[in-house]
Amino acid sequence: MGQRAAGVLIPLFSTRVGDDLGRGDILNLAPMIDFARDAGLSIIQLLPLDETAPDENSPYSAMSVLAIDPIYIAMRGVPNIGRISLARARSRVGRGRGVSRGVLRPVVLPLLERAFRSARRGRKLESDEGFAKFQDLNRDWLPEYALFRALKERFSWESWEEWPRDLAHHEPAAVETARRELAQPIAMYSWWQYLAATQWNAMRSYAHDRGVWLAGDIAFSPARESAEVWANQEMFDLTRTVGAPPDAFNQKGQRWGLPLPNWEAMRAGNFKLWETRARRAGAMFDLIRIDHVVGLYRTFSFGNDSDAEGHFSPQDRDDQIEQGERMMRALSAAAAPCAFVAEDLGSVPEWVRESLTRMNVPGYKVMRWERIGWDTPHERFVAPSAYPELSVATTGTHDTETVAEWWRELDAASREKFCSALHICDRMRPDCPRLHESSLDAIVETLYAAPSRYVILPVQDFFGWTARINRPGTINESNWTYRLPLTIERLRQNPWVAARIIKLRELARKCGRTPAA
């Protein structure tokens, strides 16, 4: 997509239709695509769809960075699941606005098991050429994932490091024995991935027919308890954990719990695991956001000693540049013709952004953070009109408060500076903590008019909603459960929302960001 485009950031679990199971699923994309298209949007940016462990809610800490979480499979699209079973499932999860993974898993997975047993009894699997082709196309990751998933069930979800020694060390003889013994559950988990892929391919075709791109998100690293780490232990340094260096907000830095990539081993193997991830993402998406892109150049990590300081890997700047650019070229080749954008927020050296520019990869411009003279009397916001063409302009991310909440908490002096920098004082009221619709329009239009190639806003910021997707540093049931306030069907019937969609489409047209025919 070479032309200027506007898009919406919405996690798949946040989409909402009348007959889903309380959490967004793959088939929810069809009405979401139509909703976005009508609003003049041609990109739907999703968060990672990766499968996580039963007790993990964050999509950025995956049990597999290659497998789609089965809870995203739309049950209404699965063979051998009838209306009565679906009605019972809906009654079990309830009809609340947001349903957690912990509530949905014990409802959805038994339905998928039943569907698999029915397909197996009817000998439909053996004759399903599509399933056979899917397994062949994904042979570089699917067998190890399905085996890992089956072993996790066998050992009651205990850490793979506690499994019998030969299995824990991924010794070939033990792996092959387990593969024979667990042939049936391996086939089931593989079939679930086939169901997810079948539904996904249908939605991607639906999007393409309407001139809409689906954008994905490659999380930085799989979790320690993941199929990819277990099957590729030599590619990770399990004595160290990835994080962020100390700063003004975290004097000891941040520990994310992700294993440190063994960059020397990965370079020696031509980044095979990363290329597999990129090839998989390129087969699913039209645009890919690379999470924590600076980590591909240099990764900050800590050892087991909680008092010891962390360090970067690699440590030499020239090595960092060489590694990052080699990685980016490898990912681009593997995912072609898919395009990339880079999440380059936080403490990112300027030379990383210069490197991304050389490779024609857009970085992010989060409006509220684009300032000159931070924490000085001369601090001022940067007008979006000054953003480079090679950028993604936005009001916020999945980790920030919504623009309406941000505006409310901003002091009056900062609001005044913001309006002056964007030259919209005549359209906003800095003295008012409430972000009125006309003020929201002024912000959206200013971003739309920016030179930035892409403008992608969180769905809440198009409508002035305040509910958040995630609050970093907190663990509670409200994180990663946000859903639209109404089903998409009911949103369309709401007079205010319908008028808002027309207004957004007009803003996109006015600023040259209308979807292609």
Image (tube, grey):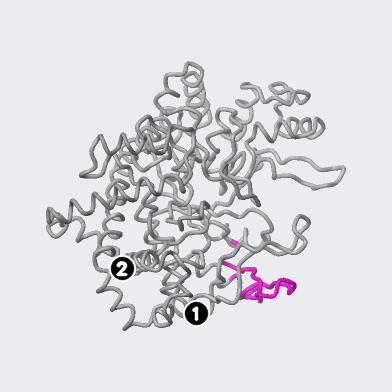
Q: Quick one: 359 or 303, which is closer to the camera?
A: 303
Measured as percent of width and height from the top left, residue 388 is found at: 61, 46
Q: Nearer the viewer, mark 2 or mark 1?
A: 2
Q: Residues within 10 Å of mark 2 (few under 14, many from 20)?
A: some
Q: Which residue is mark 1?
A: 265
394 shown above or below 257? above
Number of marks:
2
Q: Quick one: 358 or 44, which is closer to the camera?
A: 44
Q: Quadrant of the C terminus?
A: top left
Residue at point 38%, 54% (across, down): 68
157 shown above or below 475? below
Of mark 2 and mark 1, the one earlier in the sequence is 2
Q: Secondary structure at mark 2?
A: helix
Q: Quadrant of residue 283?
A: bottom left
Q: Quadrant of the N terminus?
A: top left
Q: Is residue 314 magenta?
A: yes
The kind of residue tagged 1 is Ala
- Viewer can see residue 398: no
- Viewer can see residue 285: yes
Give the distance between the C-alpha atoms of the residues marked 2 and 1, in whole angstroms: 23 Å
Q: Quick one: 55 or 354, which is closer to the camera?
A: 55
Instruction: Please give the range of residues in magenta.
Output: 294-321
Q: Is residue 409 left or right of residue 300?
A: right
Measured as percent of width and height from the top left, residue 377 is found at: 87, 42
Q: Which residue is mark 2?
A: 143
Residue at point 30%, 52% (across, down): 197
Q: Is residue 34 left or right of residue 139?
A: right
The kind of residue tagged 2 is Pro
Q: Quadrant of residue 270?
A: bottom left
Q: Is residue 405 magenta?
A: no
Measured as percent of width and height from the top left, residue 236 is found at: 52, 75
